[in-house]
Amino acid sequence: MSTYLIAFVVSDFKYISAKDKKGVLVGIWARKKAIEDGQGNYALKITQPILEFFEKYYNTSYPLSKSGMTMIKNKTEPWKTGVLSLTERRLFYTIRRRLPMATILFASHSLPSDLCGFASYVEYLGADYAEPTWDMKDQTILYDLQRAFAVDSLTSSHPLSRKEEEVNTPSEISEMFNTISYSKGAAVLKMLSEFLTEPVFAKGLSVSLTFAFGSSVYTDLWDHLQKAVDQTPGVKLPYSVHEIMNRWILQMGFPVITIDTRTGNVSQKHFLLEPEAVVDRKSEFNYEWFVPIKWMKKQQVQDQLWLLQKSALHKPMKVSKNEWVLANLHVSGYFRVNYDLGNWERLLSQLESGHQVIPVVNRAQILDDAFNLARASIINITLALRTTKYLLHERKYIPWEAALRNLNYFFQLFDRSEVYGAMQAYLKKQVKPLFEYFGNISSNWTLFFVLRFTQIIALSLACSTGVEGCRELTRNWFKKWMQNPHNNVIHPNLRSTVYCNAIAAGGAEEWNFGWQMFQKATVAAEAVKLRSALACTKVPWLLNRYLEYTMNPEKIRKQDATSTIGYIASNIIGQSLAWDFVRANWDYFFKMYGTGSFSFSRLISDITYRFCTPFELSQLKRFQKDNAETGFGSGTRALQQAIEKTTAKIKWLAENKEPVHQWFLSESA
Ligand SMILES: *[C@@H]1O[C@H](CO)[C@@H](O)[C@H](O)[C@H]1NC(C)=O
Ligand SMILES: *[C@@H]1O[C@H](CO)[C@@H](O)[C@H](O)[C@H]1NC(C)=O
Ligand SMILES: *[C@@H]1O[C@H](CO)[C@@H](O)[C@H](O)[C@H]1NC(C)=O
Ligand SMILES: *[C@@H]1O[C@H](CO)[C@@H](O)[C@H](O)[C@H]1NC(C)=O
Ligand SMILES: *[C@@H]1O[C@H](CO)[C@@H](O)[C@H](O)[C@H]1NC(C)=O
Ligand SMILES: *[C@@H]1O[C@H](CO)[C@@H](O)[C@H](O)[C@H]1NC(C)=O
């Protein structure tokens, strides 16, 4: 095991524990108050079914006599004693995507660091088993695939697998536990399990875990999976698992698959967000992949196609007038898809006339692909915008979330320009039915569990675009709470949105009330909601004061400072304040967070997220130059990415701002 995975914890925490059926002692350690308030109970309860699931899944008994989880302030990776360290927030999360990470115990005690994507992937399987109604598996496309796409489409990306000798300093270690290793790792393994089929995948894994305690690497895993393939009649691969997977893990990036339904021509190309980007990292595979393509036409699932070269003619994909082809069915592959214009048109009209025919994850992926293809200037932006028209009828979470993320990017690009008004009007029109739908099914916004994520979106988008009734609703809830601080009637899952809207609409009084409640909060999740909502105010002096608080650990704990600045930077008024603040106090932030800290690269991307003008680019470059001597530690890559992204946006805006403005105007009329 790598030495940097070991840690010792000395604490005055309390714990709760229980033995599972097989006698494994499960324990949760945390602050005394948190344990007394019962905040560890869920983690304790959920750990057992998850361990059980993995025992079945891998056909391997859990090898240790105990399994513990605790929280520590800064992140390290799980280690072999069966103790898992989490931030408190994560340990107690009940609503967000991840269950307590007990799920990854099985994988993590045996796998090398470059397999952390593996942990991410199987984590969902365990979670899906423990909470089947949460659609956790589908959500991997939001939390892994799309997140990985975003960074892996930049030239500053890197291959998934790195040689051990390249990893030496704390910042290099920290950088390794990034989006690429977790999210791309998970997405690529999901693809593998889809084309091998789940039983073969699980069989291969269980063998590899039996040999687990050595320092295995991907290669070993491929060997075991290959054996499983060889022993299973009916599973045929065009190449070995090694040959197929090497292309996905030893070269960075991923392809966009283009299907021309007029001819049946299928081709691949390395997808780069910046159209004219030059990749200076050589790949022995020439940025070509062996691509398993699942697809459907005429509403029928077709045989999987393997694209094994740059392009190939696949006659079944040639379709006549009214049919459409949908590729990457159930989003099982790690690639984007583009079509000829005719097929795009037919898909769009299918979405508007009967979107249920297309699987929900594909609806989300069509949106995400279209917007990103447009950002890369591969398709016209108006085509991407048209994928949002059907949302009028959409009631599911995943497509709305995908749309919102891409539209958020638009918000950031346009909220300081004249496009904003028309865009607001269009979105208001789109979200109104969703908002009313929830209003109608539960007039007091009681939560229906499965719908909860969509409700949050409905509420936040409706309030931010000014749908009638939304702001009043949230303001009243908040006012009631201010009148009676001991009785907060706002449903926990809606609180983030309600707090943010109320504080944005209010002044110092609302802010100070929120601050008081933040200081008193004993539940970690509640404290996070308040801390982020406090950044929503539109009052500059309140924002500046809040920024100052981040340098005072008595007000904002050290581990929360950088994310607090990130929240402030996501506010249109807070953005420039945060940027100035961090630059002015650069020495402090670098000294406190610059080495070996996850949050540091996040800080840099947060404060530069909205940058899209030549002036901002020059500021960014200047910043890089001015601090060249101190350096950027674990944020080095993040800074490089910020420069790339800003450059790309400037260019994109020059070509697309006007068509976008026109489109929103015509659609909101
Ligand atoms: C699980 O492991 C046991 C022995 O450890 C073996 O007999 C059994 O066949 C395995 N089951 C599967 C599905 O591989
Ligand atoms: C298929 O499309 C690719 C990419 O546009 C092109 O290079 C190739 O020549 C086409 N093949 C055929 C048979 O039309
Ligand atoms: C995109 O399409 C719109 C309308 O269809 C058109 O006005 C615009 O010129 C197109 N933009 C590009 C870059 O082709
Ligand atoms: C919600 O109720 C209003 C008034 O009762 C009605 O006009 C509207 O059509 C309903 N909306 C939905 C989406 O059911
Ligand atoms: C909200 O509505 C539900 C069902 O309509 C009802 O049971 C519940 O008491 C209501 N809650 C409040 C706070 O009014
Ligand atoms: C954890 O935090 C402590 C003090 O806050 C710091 O000295 C240490 O370097 C951090 N460790 C890691 C791995 O970030």
Image: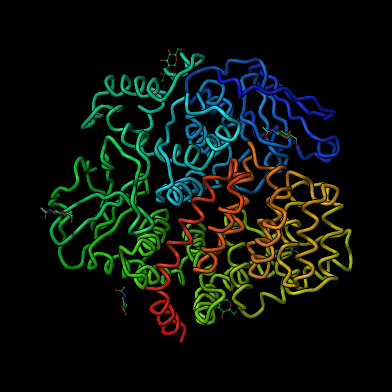
* 419 in relation to 499, above or below: below
- At horizontal 51% and vertical 55% (from top left) the residue drawn is 642
Quarter occupied by the N terminus: top right
* 210 in relation to 29, above or below: above
Q: How many numbered tags mark residues here?
A: 0
* 280 in relation to 537, above or below: above
Residue 289's x, y, as percent? 27, 40
Find residue 245 and report its image quarter.
top left
Residue 298's x, y, as percent? 23, 58
Residue 446's x, y, as percent? 68, 62
Of residues 105 and 494, the one nearer the viewer is 105
- At horizontal 80% and vertical 63% (from top left) the residue drawn is 545
The answer to whether residue 603 shows anywhere in this view is yes
Which residue extends farthest bottom? Answer: 669
| Left or right relative to 132: residue 350 | left
The answer to whether residue 446 shows anywhere in this view is no
Find residue 439 and report its image quarter.
bottom right
Residue 84's x, y, as percent? 66, 28
